[in-house]
Structure formats: structure tokens, C-alpha cells
Image: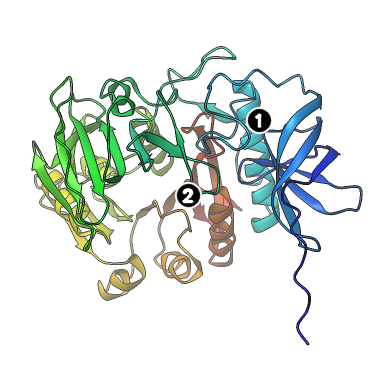
Amino acid sequence: MQAEPRKSLVGEEYEVEIGPVAHGGHCIARTSEGQVLFVRHALPGERVVARVTEGEQGARFLRADAVEVLDASKDRIDVPCPFAGPGRCGGCDWQHAKPGAQRRLKADVIAEQLQHLAGLTPQEAGWDGTVVPAEGDKVPAGQVPSWRTRVQYAVTADGRAGLRRHRSHEVEPIDHCMIAADGVSELGIEKRDWTGMDSVEAIAATGSQDRQVILTPKPGARLPLVELDRPVSVLRVDERSGGVHRVHGRPFVRERADGRTYRVGGGGFWQVHPQAADTLVTAVMQGLLPRKGDMALDLYCGVGLFAGALADRVGDQGAVLGIESGKRAVEDARHNLAEFDRVRIEQGKVESVLPRTGITEVDLIVLDPPRAGAGRKTVQHLSSLGARRIAYVACDPAALARDLGYFRDGGYRVRMLRAFDLFPMTHHVECVAILEPAAKGL
């Protein structure tokens, strides 16, 4: 006999007290029946009316939006963006919080993840418990820093550019994104007709005047004639292969960091905050303290940002091996670092390529894995290489905490952790953890 389907609770409203922040841009509350609510657009300590957006009777938890604030936090401000709020653009999580409060919320999430997944207090992680704003982002409450140098717009059926709603494929049409960098806003993507396109990505390089638009057409659609107010290269994504092809202009942009220029082709990965690459390189190098002659690994190396910084510092007697899975990124990394005879870039997944290298000992390791983290198997391998120091760059505190636990099992301890607010107005945060052999810390 089949069980009766559970009743959907979408649209139901509950008056609740908001508890602590949780990872993902929401806070925790409970209904009078004890059911857990993950509530967006709320702040700890508030009393709100929460309207359910996902979930059913008997589910482990429900998702909800705060649609009415009955008792506001002192950290609450009016939302600056006209497209933010319940049921609207999902790009920003914390526009309703003062900038300092946003960073405190992120710090609370990092601390909770470290404790829950790695059993570490902030003191044990060598962390002062703060999230540091990027240079230029210290703006008054109610103002929004324009920082995002890469924005991917979705397109409505009638050709309007917009952004996805939270946990939805629906598009919120916009006429301006407040967190978009000036170089992106100048392209005027929101003012054009993009009929036939599935998405439009706009890129404004840091440290150069390069601008790029990447078009992803719907099946069978023709590309629009792109005439913008300033020189811009145009690429398209092949609907079958997913490959990126040049329409006109350069197939790459030039980014600057640590005194070097990096070629980034085909919409490849680069940090989206203008200060992010320099901020992270500085934190990693200050933590590793490279020496002349060191042998170093740069894992998930992208176009070679950390490999280049390491190569500059380990000198002609040192060596750097970078490993990256993306074919185009590997081509760019080899181009970017061609001047260094003792830098090698290998293509493939870290967990597959690293064991084949035959490397059994290194001095330094940098890893900047994707959001899911490096994982137990890779961390176990890295722990066996005897590195003097390891720098772990993480965009997800949960994945970082899990992997730090694996490193502890492999004989490493966290010497220092730093956290940077490189994604203002969102729940995302970037961390750099420096590890060393546990015996050294005794």
C-alpha cells in the first residue's frame, strides 16, 4: 500500500523568533511545532513572519523567506537594491544587514563549521575570529561596493537580461546590478535585447582595459550583432560541445596580480573581486614563506596565479609543478609562466596526476580546490609528502573544515587562518589556512 503524499507547506506563514546564522545565507528558526525553518532575509534575534518557499509536512526542515519583520535587529538596514528581497534576485544574501554585521555573520559561520566538522576553536586554528574587508569595500551602511568583475546574466523569453531567483531557474529582469564592477556596468548588458540567448556573461578585467562578452545561445538561435559603447571582444559557447569560440576580438582577457600579467581565455576562472587575486597571493606567500631552492606544488592551479608567485620566490634553483584539469586553463598557465624553466604544468585531475608524477617529497604546497574541497584521498596523499608548510585556499568553509580534519589525521595542524570578505552582500567568504606538521607545533 502506497503512503499518502505529504502535504506541501509552500505559502504557509509562521511567526517565529530567528536564531543563529547558518551556512548558506539564511538563519535558523523553529515553528511552534518544532519544525526547523531555514529563513532568508532575516537576522539573528529578530521576530518575523516567515513564508515557506520549499518543504512539506513531516520534512526534516523547511525553507522560508522573512516577509514581514515584527521586531528588527539593530543590524538591519533598508535593502539598497530594488531587485533584492523575498522571491526576487538570489544573488545577494545580506543586503539587509550593515556591512560590519555581514562580516560578523560570516565569521560565525566559519567558527561553527570549524567546530562542527574539524573540532577546532578559532584559537586552535590560529584565527582572530574576524573577516577582513577587501580594500575599497569599507562603505557606509546603505551603500553597496561595486566589485563583481564577472557577471553572468540569464535571459528571459522576451530577451531581457536578468539574474536568477534564489534556488530557481526563473529570471528576475534587472536594469542594473549594484554589485557589478564599473567596467561591467559600462557594457550596458541590461539595456539590450538578447532574444535567442540563454545567458550573457560580461567580464571586465582587473589591471587592463580588456572587456569581454560571452554568449550562450539557445539551440538554433542566431547570434545578435553586439555593438557596445566601448571596444569589447565577443565569444560564444557552442551549444553541443560547450566549447568557447571567438566571434571577434581577443579570445582572452589580461588580468594583473602580484606584479604580473595573466592571460585568461574563454571565460576561464579568475577571482571576481578586483582585489582578490593580490589579497590571496599576499596571504599565501606570507604564510608559506618560500625560500630559494624550494620545490613547490600548486594544485588546482588554474592559469597559474600561485605558481607564478611561487616561481618568482623560489628562484632558478627551485621548481614548481602545477596541476589543473581544464585544458584551456593549462594552455594559459603554460603561456603565462613560459619564462620560468623550472615550472611545469600538467593537465588532469589532481587525484589522478599527482600519484603518477612519482613525487615523494616537497617543501611547499598550495591548493585552491573547487567548492567541494580536495577530499580525504587527496589530503592523505598530500600529508605523506612532508611539506614544510601547506596553504589551503577555500571558498567554502564547510569543505575547508572537513579537509582540515583530514589533514589533522595526516599529521598536520593549522598554524594560521585568515578570512576575507571578497564577496560582499553574499554569504560567500574566502579563507586561507596555513598548515604545518603537528610535531613542529609541540
What is the C-alpha distance between the residues marked 2 and 1?
30 Å
Q: Is residue 123 visible?
A: no
Q: Is mark 1 on a helix, strand or loop?
A: helix
Amino acid residing under circle 2: His
In the image, is residue 279 above or below residue 152?
Answer: above
Q: Is residue 436 visible?
A: yes
In the image, is residue 57 above or below residue 390?
Answer: below
Viewer-nearest residue: 337 or 66: 66
- Label 2 Cα neighbours within 10 Å, binned few <14 / some 14-19 / many ≥20: few
> In the image, what residue occupies the spot 58% across and 53% down?
398
> In the image, what residue occupies the spot 28% across and 34% down?
202
Image quarter of residue 22: top right
Residues marked 2 and 1 touching at CB (< 8 Å): no
Q: Measured from the top left, where is residue 76 in percent x and y? A: 70, 21
Residue marked by disc 1: 104
Which residue is most to the right? Answer: 32
Q: Measured from the top left, where is residue 283 in percent x and y? A: 42, 36
Viewer-nearest residue: 128 or 12: 12
Q: Is residue 333 left or right of residue 421?
A: left
Q: Measured from the top left, where is residue 244 in percent x and y? A: 18, 52
Amino acid residing under circle 1: Arg
How many dots with numbers? 2
Which residue is most to the front? Answer: 158
> In the image, what residue occupies the spot 25% across and 71% down?
357
Q: Measured from the top left, where is residue 395 in percent x and y? A: 48, 46
Viewer-nearest residue: 359 or 166: 166
Q: In this view, does 340 lie to the left or right of 205?
A: left
Which residue is most to the top? Answer: 140
Residue marked by disc 2: 169
Q: In this view, does 227 lie to the left or right of 176?
A: left
Q: Is residue 297 left or right of residue 77?
A: left
> In the image, what residue occupies the spot 65% across and 57% down?
117
